[in-house]
Amino acid sequence: QVQLVESGGGAAQVGGSLSLTCAVSGHTSTLYALAWFRQTAGKDREFVAAITWNGGTTYYVDPLPGRRTISRDKTKSTLSLRLNNLNPEDTAIYYCAARRSGGSSADPNEYEYWGQGTQVTVSS
């Protein structure tokens, strides 16, 4: 089993930045990749970014460089997401997810473990 606990969400201004953290515990040696998804009311969970746990290879939905940065620290057993140049469309609940096998990084069905989510609210 793997446990995921997000933190770092909150309110931010348009154009500002936020850092989200996910504490990863349990059988982390079995993990292949971790990811961030986000969800707003009435919509499906949307892929944001993913990273392989061992190799650190990253995948992003956003082609704009620097807009979002995913990273992981195996020594601290944490996953992070840096959100830059925030806009109101970034308002959502952000979820940390983990999976033990390869596959599509962007498909939430590939992920076996989920955190409880952390709210991000962006206003002008």
Image (cartoon, grey):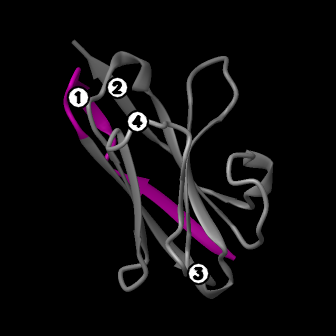
Helix or strand or loop: what does disc 1 sit on? Answer: strand
Spatial CA distance of label 1 from label 4 is 20 Å
N-terminal of the two: label 1 or label 4?
1
Amino acid type indicated by mark 3: Gly
- Which image quadrant for residue 9? top left
Estimate the spatial distance between the alpha carbons at disc 2 and disc 3, rounded to whole Å. Answer: 30 Å
What is the x, y in percent for residue 109?
80, 49
**Which is nearer the N-term, disc 1 or disc 2?**
1
Label 4, on which residue?
64
* Residue 123 figure quarter: top left
Please name the residue that numbered disc 1 is placed on: 12
CB under 8 Å between discs 1 and 3: no
- Cα distance in 3D space between marks 1 and 3: 32 Å
Q: Which amino acid type is shown beneath numbered disc 1?
A: Ala
Q: CA distance from mark 3 to mark 4?
A: 34 Å
Secondary structure at badge 4 equals: loop
Residue beneath disc 2: 121
* Disc 2 element: strand
| Circle 2 or circle 4, nearest the eye | 4
Q: Which mark is residue 35?
A: none
The residue under label 3 is 26
Q: Is residue 98 magenta?
A: no
CB under 8 Å between discs 1 and 2? yes
Seen from this angle, which residue lies furthest top?
Answer: 124
Q: Does residue 116 show up?
A: no
